[in-house]
């Protein structure tokens, strides 16, 4: 991305993802979102005197799984460290995190922007505990008379995924984030509910003259919680840094915060004021040793990842675009595969899944997971079309009824008498009647006006309430008219 | 009833209970009377739990009445250092910061002793947050040495040592980060064991320095000590650093025989700073051990001189982080201020005493960016060297011995003005914590009427050999039978 005709943007991201284990990282409290304030807490996550952490093995399993899906090496030896700083939402005034020996290292993922593929490196991913949440009586901390702290979130496991500064444009950043979230959802290590704050982004941005090989001075904007905030924040920050450089000044290395309301970034603290976190090895936990056996056991639980899945769907005849749309979300891809396993043509199924089925869900603001139509039912509907029992048009209305009633398509067809008329004898009688009633059109057709046949077909469909098999009607009518 | 019970060891009390010479209630009452009689002078207790103790005793009596077989510690009155959490009972760490802190949970040792049927008499004094060697750093009161009330009892488990020495409890638990069980045990003439790091769960022990802290028993006899270890040691899933293995029956090691036992005495522990009278006392102990058939020889732990600086960097670094949670937000003392940061600052300024603040500042400095490598990291390397010193020594010797402290108890105020002198008095104890190995202090004589302690150090998880050697020494000496000559009016209660 070229900024002000002469600068190149460089961006790296830190993404904090809540892992969806049932219990917290160092105690047995539930990780469930919400809940009355300070009800999902115990002496350990409240940092009471004498309480000690015990590492939840499931968190390690999830971190390994995410690491493998992100093409990382899983460190045989890693450890936890204390990151010391004072803040009321931090119950011990230190965060138990991983500093110099994280569990996942040297990974990456491939993004595609306007047809160009690019590898974005992942430096590391490490486990840590989330903090609690400040609850202010007023709008903001400065306008509040009092604040309370809710520690329900304290100790919820996080994976912090740190990328290399490999991104050069905002579309690349967004592509990276989409891909990352997609992989995390696929592996089911996180539900990635952005609106609940289960994924948070820190954006590191700098500019440098085009052609420069060294990096410019960067700023880090912390705690963004949606893709659109990331986009807007970057647009603002890139423009701001360009203005600074254009004015002949230097960008200050600092931590900034994003003001969603005003759409601007604000300085939080400069390098000189930066926290000294005084990291040191967490003496209350023993180092984490992960043998190859453990890693391989987790590798076996990895689902087919989006890229592999897309490639497989393309071998079934789907276009790259269609395969991409269907594999975008795991739920949808799973639905597709489940329907496909009932038999039928992949391409036709893709058209239905991406077309009418998705439209129905969208209209009703329903997720694939909550769909009242099962994959098996959709497959059955397509079989009915294939066998000639239903016309495509009637099938669409059957699909709508399936959505509202959850009934099998065959049952709806039976109850409503919607089966397509493919009985030649029955159709011939109707065709004869239509021909007799429309001599002018018959004349026109025979005089070479091909369009007239369309009118006649329409009349036949009308007479059969749309249930006539359109192919058969066409064929029989043409035979009749030319005889 | 007091004449029957007070002054007796845990195993003797157990016999009295089993034979129904005394009930648990009578025994508990006798101890409470004793506390009321002597504690105004000694100030060992911060909290006495008369009602709760009598309720617990009544439960034991009921079990006795029902003919249940009595466990070794069942019905035995004891005290806990006030840094071990007790559900519903204030746990203050002898700090203003936790003056009103009532934990909603028990430490694992509290639970285990409860399960063993012991009677909790109360919580005993200590240096604030276990930082100190004289118990003078308590926010609440000064505990006095029962052998001479003008002298300190040692620390930081001063209250725990005094309670046992003055028969205010049949036994107690202390914690030892750099000598805090062994040094007061030596100063007060009782038996104090610092087990292997990880042998006893730290869950619910209010942390001073997590990688060094270890809970252990203070008792009148070696046998009692082994009995208490049987109750408190063993793997605890709540403490990730607890050793995942079955604990032995420590009483099995109590044999009166050390023939052929190889004992080393590291020359560095008998050098500068060791009181000549103490050194003479320990020499006499060595002779005793030789007479009993042990093979004693000199050895070297060459990195000993670096132990004190390494200890005071690692311990304070961990403490600076461990004590960060006391900010007035969730529990404990809170000072009023205009904003959150002000509240943090004021709470910590008013809530902590000077020694605690000194160590927090030292530790914060040691971990600071730019100093970490020179201080904390270097100290960790020294720690490794000290461990290796011990590993090498244990290739030749079964156990090592030294004075438990370089001097007998000192007078109140003697070292308060000179923290460094106070720190240096830990020279014989801190290397053991850095190495994570077990060590026991047992009564080994007197200097000017004040007890001195013999320290025996063992291989990791080899408390058994320490008990064997300590037991043999005890069975062949009389030091442990001597009692402090408390005020005459107090003694009419009749301890012997």
Image (cartoon, coloured by chain):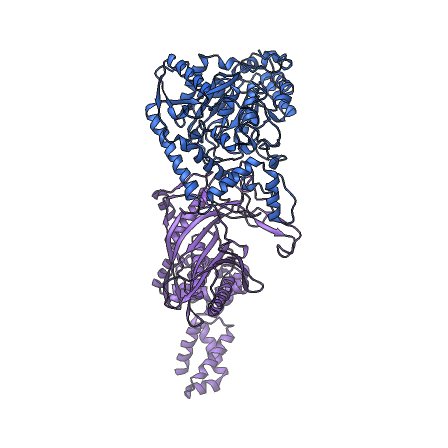
Chain colours: A purple, B blue
Residue B252 visible in the snapshot: no
**Horizontal and vertical percent position of residue B469:** 41, 18
Q: Which quarter of the rendering shows the N terminus of chain B?
A: top right
Q: Quadrant of the C terminus of chain B?
A: top right
User: Total of numbered circles in the picture?
Assistant: 0
The vertical placement of A270 against B116, above or below, is below
Could you say where residue A311 lies in the image, as x and y percent from the top left?
A: 35, 61
- Farthest residue, direction right: A145
Res. A89 in view: yes
Observer-nearest of B287 and A255: B287
Task: Report the side of B214 relative to A70 (left or right).
Answer: right
Q: Quadrant of residue A70?
A: bottom left
Left or right of residue A411: residue A2: left
Q: Nearer the viewer, residue B143 or B414?
A: B414
Seen from this angle, which residue lies furthest bottom? A447
Q: Residue B444 location, x and y as percent?
A: 46, 17
Residue extending furthest toward the left: B396
Is residue A450 placed above or below B415 in the rendered structure?
below
User: Residue B430: which quarter of the image?
Assistant: top left
The x, y position of residue B318, in whole percent, is: 48, 39
* Viewer-side residue, A350 vs B352: B352
Q: Nearer the viewer, residue B248 or B30?
A: B30
Q: Is residue A414 above or below residue A429?
A: above
Residue at position x 34%, y 62% in the image: A315
């Amino acid at each position: 991305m070229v900024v002000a005709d002469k600068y190149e943007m460089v961006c790296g991201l830190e993404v904090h993802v809540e892992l969806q284990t049932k219990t917290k990282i160092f105690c047995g409290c539930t990780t469930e979102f919400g809940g009355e304030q300070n009800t999902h807490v115990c002496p350990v996550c409240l940092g009471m005197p004498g309480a000690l952490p015990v590492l939840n093995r499931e968190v390690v399993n999830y971190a390994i799984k995410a690491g493998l899906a992100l093409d990382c090496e899983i460190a045989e030896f890693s450890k936890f460290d204390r990151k010391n700083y004072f803040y009321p939402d931090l119950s011990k005034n230190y965060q138990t995190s991983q500093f110099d020996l994280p569990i996942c290292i040297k990974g990456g993922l491939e993004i595609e922007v306007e047809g160009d593929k690019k590898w974005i490196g992942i430096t590391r991913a490490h486990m840590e505990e989330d903090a609690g949440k400040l609850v202010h009586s007023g709008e903001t901390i400065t306008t509040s008379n009092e604040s309370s702290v809710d520690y329900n979130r304290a100790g919820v496991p996080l994976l912090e995924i740190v990328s290399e500064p490999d991104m050069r444009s905002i579309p690349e950043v967004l592509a990276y984030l989409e891909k990352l979230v997609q992989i995390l959802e696929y592996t089911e290590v996180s539900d990635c509910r952005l609106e609940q704050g289960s994924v948070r982004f820190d954006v590191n941005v700098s500019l440098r003259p085009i052609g420069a090989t060294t990096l410019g001075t960067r700023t880090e904007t912390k705690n963004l919680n949606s893709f659109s905030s990331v986009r807007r924040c970057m647009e603002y920050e890139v423009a701001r840094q360009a203005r600074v450089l254009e004015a002949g000044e230097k960008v200050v290395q600092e931590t900034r915060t994003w003001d969603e309301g005003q759409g601007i970034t604000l300085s939080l603290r400069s390098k000189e004021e930066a926290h000294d976190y005084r990291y040191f090895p967490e003496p209350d936990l023993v180092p984490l040793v992960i043998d190859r056996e453990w890693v391989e056991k987790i590798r076996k639980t990895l689902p087919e990842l989006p890229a592999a899945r897309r490639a497989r769907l393309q071998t079934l005849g789907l276009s790259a675009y269609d395969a991409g749309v269907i594999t975008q979300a795991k739920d949808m891809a799973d639905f597709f595969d489940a329907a496909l396993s009932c038999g039928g043509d992949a391409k036709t199924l893709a058209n239905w899944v991406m077309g009418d089925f998705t439209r129905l869900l969208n209209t009703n603001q329903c997720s694939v997971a909550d769909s009242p139509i099962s994959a098996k039912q959709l497959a059955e509907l397509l079989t009915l079309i294939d066998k000639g029992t239903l016309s495509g048009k009637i099938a669409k209305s059957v699909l709508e009824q399936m959505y509202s009633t959850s009934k099998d398509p065959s049952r709806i067809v039976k109850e409503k008498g919607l089966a397509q008329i493919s009985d030649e004898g029955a159709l011939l009688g109707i065709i004869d009647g239509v021909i007799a009633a429309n001599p002018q059109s018959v004349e026109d057709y025979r005089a070479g006006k091909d369009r007239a046949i369309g009118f006649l077909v329409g009349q036949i469909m009308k007479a059969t309430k749309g249930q006539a098999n359109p192919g058969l009607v066409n064929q029989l009518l043409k035979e009749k008219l030319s005889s | 009833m007091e004449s029957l019970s007070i002054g007796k060891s845990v195993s003797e009390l157990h016999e009295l209970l089993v034979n129904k010479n005394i009930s648990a209630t009578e025994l508990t009452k006798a101890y409470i009377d004793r506390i009321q009689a002597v504690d105004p002078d000694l100030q060992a207790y911060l909290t006495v739990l008369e009602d709760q103790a009598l309720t617990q005793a009544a439960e034991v009596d009921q079990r006795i009445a029902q003919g249940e077989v009595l466990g070794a510690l069942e019905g035995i009155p004891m005290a806990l250092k006030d840094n071990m959490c007790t559900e519903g009972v204030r746990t203050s760490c002898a700090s203003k910061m936790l003056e009103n802190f009532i934990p909603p949970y028990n430490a694992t040792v509290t639970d285990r002793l409860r399960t063993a049927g012991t009677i909790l008499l109360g919580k005993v004094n200590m240096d604030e947050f276990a930082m100190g060697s004289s118990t003078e750093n308590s926010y609440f009161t000064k505990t006095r040495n029962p052998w001479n009330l003008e002298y300190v009892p040692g620390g930081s488990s001063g209250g725990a040592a005094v309670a046992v020495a003055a028969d205010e409890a049949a036994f107690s638990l202390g914690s030892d980060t750099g000598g805090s069980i062994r040094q007061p045990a030596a100063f007060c003439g009782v038996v104090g064991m610092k087990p292997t790091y990880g042998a006893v769960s730290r869950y619910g022990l209010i942390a001073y320095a997590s990688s060094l802290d270890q809970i252990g028993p203070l008792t009148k006899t070696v046998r009692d000590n082994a009995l208490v270890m049987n109750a408190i040691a063993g793997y605890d899933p709540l403490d990730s650093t607890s050793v995942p293995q079955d604990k032995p029956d420590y009483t099995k090691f109590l044999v009166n025989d050390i023939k052929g036992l190889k004992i080393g005495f590291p020359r560095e522990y008998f050098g500068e700073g060791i009181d000549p009278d103490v050194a003479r006392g320990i020499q006499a102990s060595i002779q005793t051990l030789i007479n009993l058939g042990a093979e004693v020889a000199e050895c070297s732990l060459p990195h000993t001189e670096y132990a004190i600086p390494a200890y005071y960097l690692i311990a304070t670094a961990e403490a600076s982080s461990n004590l960060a949670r006391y900010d007035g937000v969730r529990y404990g003392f809170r000072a009023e201020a205009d904003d959150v940061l002000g509240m943090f600052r004021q709470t910590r300024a008013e809530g902590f005493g000077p020694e605690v603040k000194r160590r927090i500042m030292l530790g914060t400095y040691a971990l600071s960016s730019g100093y970490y490598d020179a201080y904390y990291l270097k100290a960790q390397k020294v720690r490794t060297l000290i461990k290796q010193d011990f590993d090498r020594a244990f290739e030749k010797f079964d156990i090592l011995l030294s004075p438990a402290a370089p001097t007998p108890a000192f007078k109140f105020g003697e070292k308060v003005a000179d923290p460094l002198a106070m720190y240096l008095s830990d020279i014989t104890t801190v290397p053991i914590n850095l190495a994570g190995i077990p060590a026991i202090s047992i009564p080994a004589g007197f200097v000017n009427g004040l007890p001195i302690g013999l320290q025996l150090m063992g291989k990791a998880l080899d408390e058994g050999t320490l008990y064997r050697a300590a037991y043999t020494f005890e069975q062949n000496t009389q030091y442990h039978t001597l009692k402090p000559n408390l005020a005459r009016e107090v003694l009419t209660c009749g301890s012997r």
